[in-house]
Image (cartoon, helix red, strand yellow):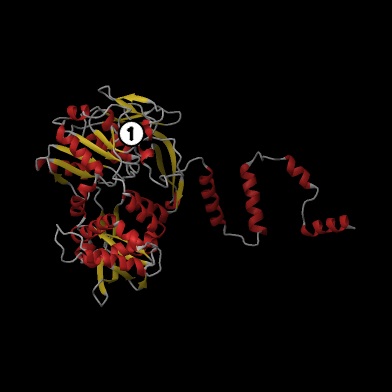
């Protein structure tokens, strides 16, 4: 009876009882296209929650890309492609010229770029966006608000702001313009005639920005240069090669790309150097990747710069963006980058995709000197370590926190966003009326502490007071940045920057590039 009931149930459900044995024997279909067609047909005809055919094809295409053994492969819709290009190249988009952040559901202006409609319209950092045109933005995702602000250059967008200390909302009309965010936000001549150039991205104007900075500093009397690519995750590789052109004689190899089954592509300098043999230091860290590593690696291999900092990320894969019909595009890995000495930039490391290590460890920074790695030689015969990334000639970890500072950082770590909002709002409160040489006042710390308490940040008063030096540095940085801009904030921070001060010390002791390289410690004794 139980068997009869089971067979009846299977018959009612329409299950292929006999065919089951046959299907188990056919484990891999010879015709994948036919299989897909059959699956698609069954879904369209029988699935309870079916989808439109266009949506099914799109999801299938995305699934195919995800199945590739390529962590950097991706499929972009027209909207996603526009966002990718904007966020990667950070240039040539139609907008107002504001960098916005989401702070506990509120959209706050974090920075206003120079010579943009936002700057001309009087927008300042700290303004809260209430409406874009007639739509309220509170509670919207950051990308949603960004999309509302972006648009065709020449079109108008109306924005309503709430400014701290101003009771009435501020309504402004902007005519969107092409926004060009500089890759080099400022260039400074530091003590001792050292020109400092922070290269923050490789957008479409990066090489032009670096060349303009080099020439301006040279005219001011620069006797040496520091090119800072710490935190620069890359961008346009063409711009990286153009920047290499600024430091080498024509014909010097800049980098090579090796593809599967193809002759390697060799990239060489094509124009005279703009700084001749002036001493150069490049600063790198674990967040310097891709295009940053191409620049640092070529300068190191040709003995054109002393590299200082911690080992770079090690992203040496070449991604190519292929356009598809309808404005779509697919990005896939097509090759690997190599430095002129033959080092692969790509590192074999314990990372998840593009992510950095969860916690920073000084031993990790100097790990390249502890494990066996392939050895290469520079043009002058100096020992250079391979194995992925760019290992500095002088390994210098950032300033480490004291024990009380570390305890404070661990306490607020799980509530870092609330800590940041309280810090930002305190800086907004006190930025007016301060002079460039201001000192952090006790009242600022008390106001910050009060805001932390209101936000229920789990930090005790004892932890806060013991870590007061970390609190003061944070307040100093943000008040300075909001009151006077990034360059002033940077000048004030130089004394806290161990890596930059090491670079400046080397440059003070070296009258030439040859002397600079001679000061570097031998391989195996690089860590400090």
Give the camera-side residue of 47 and 368. Answer: 368
Mark 1, residues whose alpha carbon is within 10 Å: few (<14), some, or many (≥20)? Answer: many
* Residue shown at 25% from the left, 45% from the top: 199
Q: Which image quarter: residue 418?
A: bottom left
* Residue shown at 62% from the left, 52% from the top: 40
Q: Quadrant of the C terminus?
A: top left
Give the camera-side residue of 449 and 155. Answer: 449
Residue 425 visible in the picture: no
Query: Horizontal and vertical percent for residue 42?
Result: 66, 54
Q: Quadrant of the N terminus?
A: bottom right
Instruction: Please name the residue that numbered disc 1 is placed on.
Output: 391
Residue at the far right: name it. 1
Query: Horizontal and vertical percent for residue 267?
Result: 30, 31
Query: Horizontal and vertical percent for residue 135?
Result: 37, 72
* Residue shown at 67% from the left, 59% from the top: 46
**Horizontal placement of 118 versus 291: left or right?**
left
Residue at the far bottom: name it. 168
Give the camera-side residue of 207 and 525. Answer: 525
The secondary element bearing badge 1 is classed as loop
Give the camera-side residue of 21 and 366. Answer: 366
């Amino acid at each position: 009876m139980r068997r009869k009931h089971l067979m009846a149930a299977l018959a009612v459900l329409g299950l292929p009882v006999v065919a089951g044995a046959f299907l188990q024997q056919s484990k891999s279909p010879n015709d994948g296209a036919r299989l897909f067609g059959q699956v698609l047909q069954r879904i369209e005809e029988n699935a309870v929650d079916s989808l439109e055919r266009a949506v099914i094809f799109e999801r299938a295409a995305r699934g195919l890309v995800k199945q590739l053994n390529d962590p950097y492969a991706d499929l972009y819709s027209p909207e996603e492609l526009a966002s990718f290009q904007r966020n990667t190249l950070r240039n040539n988009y139609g907008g107002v010229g504001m960098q916005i952040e989401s702070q506990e559901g509120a959209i706050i202006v974090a920075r206003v770029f120079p010579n943009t409609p936002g700057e001309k319209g009087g927008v300042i950092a700290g303004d809260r966006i209430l409406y874009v045109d007639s739509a309220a933005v509170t509670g919207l995702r950051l990308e949603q608000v960004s999309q509302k602000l972006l648009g065709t250059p020449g079109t108008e967008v109306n924005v309503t702001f709430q400014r701290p200390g101003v009771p009435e909302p501020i309504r402004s009309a902007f005519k969107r313009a092409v926004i060009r965010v500089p890759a080099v936000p400022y260039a400074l001549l530091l003590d001792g005639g050292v020109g400092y150039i922070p290269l923050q991205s490789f957008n479409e104007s990066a090489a032009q920005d670096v060349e303009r900075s080099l020439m301006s500093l040279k005219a001011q009397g620069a006797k040496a240069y520091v090119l800072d690519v710490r935190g620069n995750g890359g961008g346009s590789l063409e711009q990286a090669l153009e920047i290499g052109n600024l430091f080498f004689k024509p014909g010097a190899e800049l980098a090579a790309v090796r593809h599967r089954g193809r002759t390697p592509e060799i990239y060489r300098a094509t124009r005279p150097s703009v700084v001749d043999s002036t001493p150069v230091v490049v600063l790198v860290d674990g967040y310097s990747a891709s295009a940053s590593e191409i620049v640092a690696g070529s300068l190191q291999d040709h003995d054109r710069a002393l590299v200082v900092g911690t080992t770079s990320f090690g992203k040496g894969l070449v991604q190519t963006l292929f356009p598809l019909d309808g404005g779509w595009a697919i990005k896939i890995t097509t090759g690997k980058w190599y430095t002129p000495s033959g080092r692969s930039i790509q590192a074999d490391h314990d990372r998840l995709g593009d992510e950095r290590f969860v916690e920073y460890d000084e031993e990790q920074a100097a790990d390249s000197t502890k494990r066996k790695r392939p050895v290469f030689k520079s043009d002058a015969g100096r020992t250079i370590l391979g194995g992925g990334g760019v290992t500095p000639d002088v390994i210098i970890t950032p300033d480490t926190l004291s024990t009380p500072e570390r305890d404070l950082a661990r306490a607020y770590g799980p509530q870092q966003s609330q800590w940041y909002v309280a810090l930002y709002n305190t800086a907004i409160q006190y930025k007016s009326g301060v002079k460039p040489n201001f000192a952090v006042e006790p009242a600022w710390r008390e106001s910050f502490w009060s805001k932390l308490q209101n936000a229920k940040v789990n930090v005790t008063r004892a932890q806060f007071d013991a870590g007061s030096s970390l609190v003061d540095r944070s307040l100093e940085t943000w008040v300075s940045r909001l009151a006077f801009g990034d360059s002033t904030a940077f000048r004030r921070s130089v004394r806290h920057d161990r890596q930059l001060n090491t670079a400046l010390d080397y440059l003070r002791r070296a009258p030439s590039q040859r002397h600079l390289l001679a000061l570097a410690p031998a391989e195996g004794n690089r860590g400090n």
